[in-house]
Image (cartoon, grey):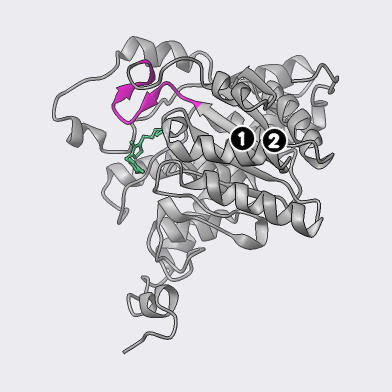
Amino acid sequence: MSTEAFADPNKQQLLALYERMLLIRRMEERLRADAAAGNLPGAVHLYIGQEAIATGVCAQLRETDWITSTHRGHGHFLAKGGDPKAMMAEIWGKRTGICKGMGGSMHVADFSKGILGANGIVGGGFAIATGAALASKLTHDERIAVAFFGDGASNQGVFMECMNVSSLWKLPLVLVCEHNQFCEFTPSAQVTSGEIADRAKAFKIPTTVIDGNDVAAVWQAAAQAVARARRGEGPSFIEARTYRIQGHLEAEDLFLAGGKYREKQEIDEWRLKDPLDRTRERLLSAGARADDLDAINARIVRTVEDAVKFAQDSEAADPELAFDLMFVGQKA
Ligand SMILES: Cc1ncc(C[n+]2csc(CCOP(=O)(O)OP(=O)(O)O)c2C)c(N)n1
């Protein structure tokens, strides 16, 4: 990308980033526990270890900007300002959920916050974000669109189509590839040829490859890409290198049936690069007090407990609603 200089987040900004990452982490740790206990009605794909990416990017967005997400979408939803209670209730399959409990983990969405949805279709967000960016260009409303996607999704053909038109038409789009090293139970190197950034370069889209576990690096790269999109100069591509700490989905052991696709040692090595620990260290070096950081954590823990209680106390989703929500006017 360009060499335009963007400042590092200051201490206040870093604190806000840390708090948002903590929210995502603590929400998901609770989901992990509830998945293991068999309390959740569906599968959850956790974002643990990747929090810096959604957080750093969404911190550069306005509430009116659009994002599209993936099957691993809780982090994007929360980073863009989605309500923790409504998300938790959705995952628990409750009427008070953000989609009335009809979508579950892979469909958390809130159009009022620009969250166009998590998506169970790998690569399903590309065309939605490109369409949103086209709409924004046609209506001159200054909104930009961000598509979050995995390295696996970059092998979908629609990725090329969306890069082609967004570059040609200079759409206000930011493509954020979260390279977490795996595509389900297969290491990326076995399914993805060459460098993903080279695919974007072929369409004359500016690219940058960054450490996705460094929230300040993500924040800066996003600032640059967002500024370019708002200037009407077209799309940018960010590849954020990271690592999926949890399984592809909780309970993956059942799928693997004793099989193995990575070594524990590799996971432990990446734990040492934990984005939250690194941000905490950075804050302490910048003069933050450990007590204050612990107080933020305590506040977040209460937020998560409230969200879980709200979900548990809510009524189960109403299957009858499927007729109204999916087949408008078709009710028998
Ligand atoms: C169109 C489509 N093909 C295949 C799948 C099955 N599937 C679900 S997740 C996944 C891997 C996606 O990998 P990546 O995009 O890197 O995201 P990650 O899971 O690593 O976050 C696959 C192949 C799907 N959901 N949709």
The answer to whether residue 213 is magenta is: no
Can residue 25 be seen in this snapshot? no
In the picture, the disc for residue 175 is 1
Can residue 198 be seen in this snapshot? yes
In the picture, the disc for residue 319 is none
Mark 2 is on which residue type?
Pro
Total labels: the figure holds 2
Which is more toward the observer, 154 or 15? 154
Q: Is 146 located above or below residue 273 in the figure? A: below
Q: Would residue 290 appear left or right of 310 to someone viewing this image?
A: right
Which is more toward the observer, 264 or 292? 264
Q: Which numbered disc, 1 or 2, marks the residue closer to the eye?
A: 2
The answer to whether residue 182 is magenta is: yes
Mark 1 is on which residue type?
Leu
Q: Would residue 32 appear left or right of 11 to someone viewing this image?
A: left
Q: Would residue 316 appear left or right of 163 to someone viewing this image?
A: left
What x and y, as percent, mark residue 140? 82, 55
Rounded to the nearest angstrom, the CA distance separating label 1 from label 2 is: 7 Å
Quadrant of residue 327 within the rendered picture: bottom left
